[in-house]
Amino acid sequence: MKRLLLRTAAFSRDLYSWLKIHPSSNGRIVAMLDALANDPRTPSLRTHKLKGKYAGCLSCSAGYDLRIVFRIIDHHDDEAIVLLAFGTHDDVY
């Protein structure tokens, strides 16, 4: 079951800023978002629970040092993924 990806303004801003500086990473990020929509627990994403500021959220890897912070919600009787933040480990946390 492919989940709907809902982008917050903060996620969109973070992603736009990243792609402006690193346009060659676009294909890799699109592939990771597709994998996330298909199955957020895919081993290659290294999905894990977060504590602190993002308690109750999950994070996955979008590359060596890139992270996507998200939350899984019910949306019109289906699961959806709300994308909250995007960036390097230090930027996100």
Image: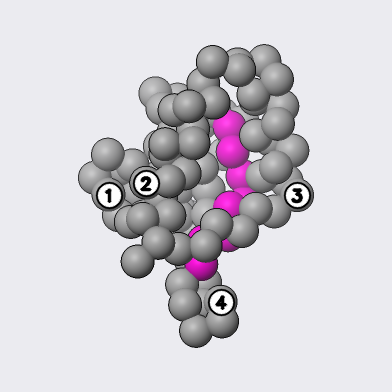
In the image, which residues are magenta? 80-87
The residue under label 2 is: 35
Q: Label 4 to label 2, Cα distance in Å? A: 19 Å
- Residue at 40% across, 61% down: 2
The tag on residue 9 is 3
Relative to 18, 48 lies left or right: left
Magenta-drawn stretch, dominant element (helix, strand or loop):
strand
Q: In the rendering, at what x and y percent does residue 38 appear?
A: 36, 55
Relative to 14, 25 lies left or right: left
Q: Residue furthest bottom?
A: 77
- Residue at 56% across, 81% down: 76
Whether the residues at callouts 2 and 1 have beta carbons within 8 Å, the answer is: yes
Q: Is residue 3 among the parts visible in the rendering?
A: yes
Which circle, 3 or 4, is nearer the viewer?
Answer: 4
Q: In the rendering, at what x and y percent does residue 77 appear?
A: 50, 84
Q: Residues within 10 Å of mark 2 (few under 14, many from 20)?
A: some
